[in-house]
Amino acid sequence: MLEEVLVTVRSNPGIDPSLAVWNWEIPLYLFLGGLVAGILLFGSLMVLLDREKDFPFVARKLPIWAFVGLSIGMFALFLDLSHKFYVWRFYTTFQVSSPMSWGAWILVLVYPVIILLTACTLREGYPALGRLVDRFRAGHALIEFACKHRALVAQWGIVLAVFLGFYTGILLSALSARPFWNTGFLAPLFLVSGMSAAAALVLLGTRSEIERHTFTRIDIVLIAVKLSLIALLLVNLATGSRVQIEAAQMVFEGEFAIPFWVFLVIPGLMIPLILEYWELKGRRRAWMLVSPVLVLYGSYMLRQLTVDMGQASSYVSYINAFDPTLLELLR
């Protein structure tokens, strides 16, 4: 009897052909990571430029939201881990070629910088919380140390903000097995998107007209840059290899065409760009809170769709499924 053995990898649980290994936790983590990078960057710049009086919300009240956002993002990432009790193993080594290893150590450095930057703003930004922290000897010493070295903290803040913003994109682009992710435009796109989200948060929280006007102008530029980077990303894919062209086609005629254009580009980019331009021209003041909300929504949707489209793109075709009747014919 001649025995025939068929081997297939089409049922490798969690890997192939599963197309949704990463769920909501990863897009949320990437969104909050970019937002924190933008907050840290703007807050540190105000300190170094000595513009705290002109931009009180950014310099004194915004940094604490970086701590809140990063904590929520880290918790979401923790929920995604399959082996949660082994998370400490990330910090027993440093792998230069691993984006996840870089990210783990960047977050270790970002946390203390955010804490120090926040501590220095508590007395003026959140007086009640500042008085509470001042009651404790360790808290008082922390605030004094942070204020004494605020310039150095801000310098590190800018460097780490750029690293953190780029990392959220490199985490995906380093996975060459997914053609939609495998492009150098994701890192700058996610950094700029995070800065835009931080600018939108400023527009929601500030009461200063100077601050609002300045960050409206900044956000208009950032949205325009985002649109340009998205266009370049799609052009890069459309002029690449066959699998990259197929990945780009998902945006124009595939299952993600409607979500991309109807749920991301139009409400998350085009509409806030128009509303913020009108606001600069003194029109539609009643809509001034709508545009930053749409910017935050668009920033999240960018991550959600990028994660979903990346997982749907592959070098392997899933059209021809294994037919179990083939085994019967070979017997």
Image (cartoon, rainbow, N blue to C red):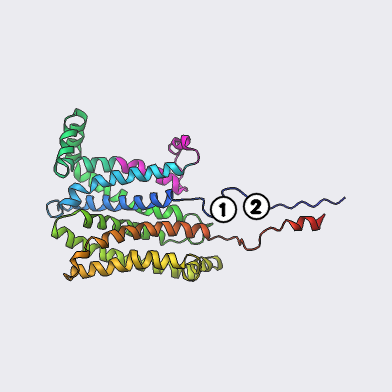
Residue for badge 1: 18
Q: Is residue 148 above or below residue 281?
A: above
Q: What residue is shown at x 75% (from left), y 58% (from top)?
A: 325
Q: Main secondary structure of the magenta part?
A: helix
Cα distance in 3D space between marks 1 and 2: 12 Å
In front: 64, or 41? 64
Residue 25 shows up from this direction: yes
The quarter of the picture where the C terminus appears is bottom right
Most extreme residue toward the right is 1
Determine the residue positioned at 14% across, 60% down: 210
Magenta-drawn segment: 82-111
Instruction: Determine if residue 106 is in view.
Output: no
Name the quadrant containing residue 315: bottom right
Marker disc for residue 9: 2
Report x, y in % for residue 192: 32, 59
| Badge nearest the viewer, 1 or 2 | 1
125 part of magenta stretch: no
Q: Amino acid at mark 1?
A: Ser
Residue 220 placement, left or right of 4 = left
Residue in the picture at 35% in, 40% down: 108
The image shows residue 122 at horizontal and vertical percentages of 18, 41
Residue at the limit of the structure toward the front, as seen here = 286
The answer to whether the residue labelled 1 contacts the one labelled 2, judged by CB atoms less than 8 Å apart, is no
